[in-house]
Image (spheres, rainbow, N blue to C red):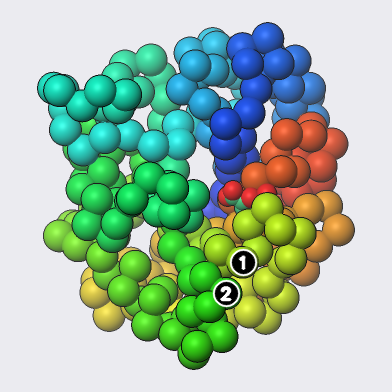
Amino acid sequence: MDKAKRAAVIAGNWKMNKTQAEAKTLIEGLIPAVKDADCTVIICTPFTDLALAVEMTKGTNIHVGAQNCHFKESGAYTGEIAANMLTEIGVEYVILGHSERRQYFAETDETVNLRAKAALAAGLKPIVCVGETLDEREAGQMETVIVRQTEGALKDFTAEELSRTIIAYEPVWAIGTGKTATAEQANEVCALIRATVAKLFSQQAADALTIQYGGSMNPKNCDELVAQYDVDGGLIGGAALKPDDFAAIVKAASK
Ligand code: PEP
């Protein structure tokens, strides 16, 4: 399958930003700004904004995602949210294994895998993040880390589950730092992820998989990044909070 046949996906990761009142204003700005998109558009909001986001985006081309979910269906897990709590209110996607979750909340390859399996079982589409730190890259460990995280996240997946999954390559050193991977670096690692998936499943499954790049993507660098053969859109942090910037990235992915 060639790039043109894969689904390009632009997902905004709002992180811990926007009260409901602020979210309302942002979504009001986003709806007209991305209405002509020829790619999939997702906003991943804080839990408290999800119901509002689902309500406000009904009848538009914007899909709604969460930023995490737990792997148990219910129980004594104070502070956690189960996958079916998300699907019940109309959430379709969930970001899992973001480097901030791995760094600050002890997320591991194993818990990312458990959360992804639970998300899929509940009908959510996971956006699984993988990425190396600067130390790992400089120590020549990028490949080992990416393969380990990819294999770990997809452990025990069926081909059908893979077909509902998106992977986001997010080099930790490029997230929120203003440092972007070069288009060549982004493409190289997305291709590595695709090759890893081909070994685990099949070339056909790997060719159909949407693999995003994330890390300081903005209106200036998005054209070159999303044009890369193995880069199928982006996971966007800071620029997702500005309708014009987000819309420019969506437009680049729509070409
Ligand atoms: C992210 O948080 O997933 C991200 C890519 O952030 P930023 O675009 O701000 O680097």
- Which SS class for mark 2? helix
Q: Residue at x 70, y 16 (%)?
A: 22
Q: Amino acid at mark 1?
A: Trp
Instruction: Name the foreground residue: 4 vs 108.
Output: 108
User: Label 2 near label 1: C-beta < 8 Å?
Assistant: yes
Taking 210 as reference, is 114 left or right? left
Counting every numbered tag in the picture gives 2
Q: Which residue is mark 1?
A: 173
**Residue 65: mark in rendering:** none
- Which SS class for mark 1? helix
Quadrant of residue 248 in the image?
A: top right
In which quadrant of the rendered image does the C terminus lie? bottom right
Q: Tell me which numbered mark, 1 or 2, is placed earlier along the sequence.
A: 2
CA gap, disc 1 to disc 2?
5 Å
**Residue 134: mark in rendering:** 2
Q: Position of residue 52 (x, y in %)?
A: 55, 12
Taking 25 as reference, is 186 left or right? left
Taking 37 as reference, is 196 left or right? left
Q: Residue at x 83, y 52 (%)?
A: 219
Instruction: Name the foreground residue: 67 vs 192.
Output: 67
Relative to 169, say whether 7 is above or below: above
The residue furthest bottom is: 140
Q: What is the crowding at mark 2: few (fewer than 14 residues within 10 Å), some, or many (at least 20)? A: some
Q: Position of residue 162 (x, y in %)?
A: 29, 56
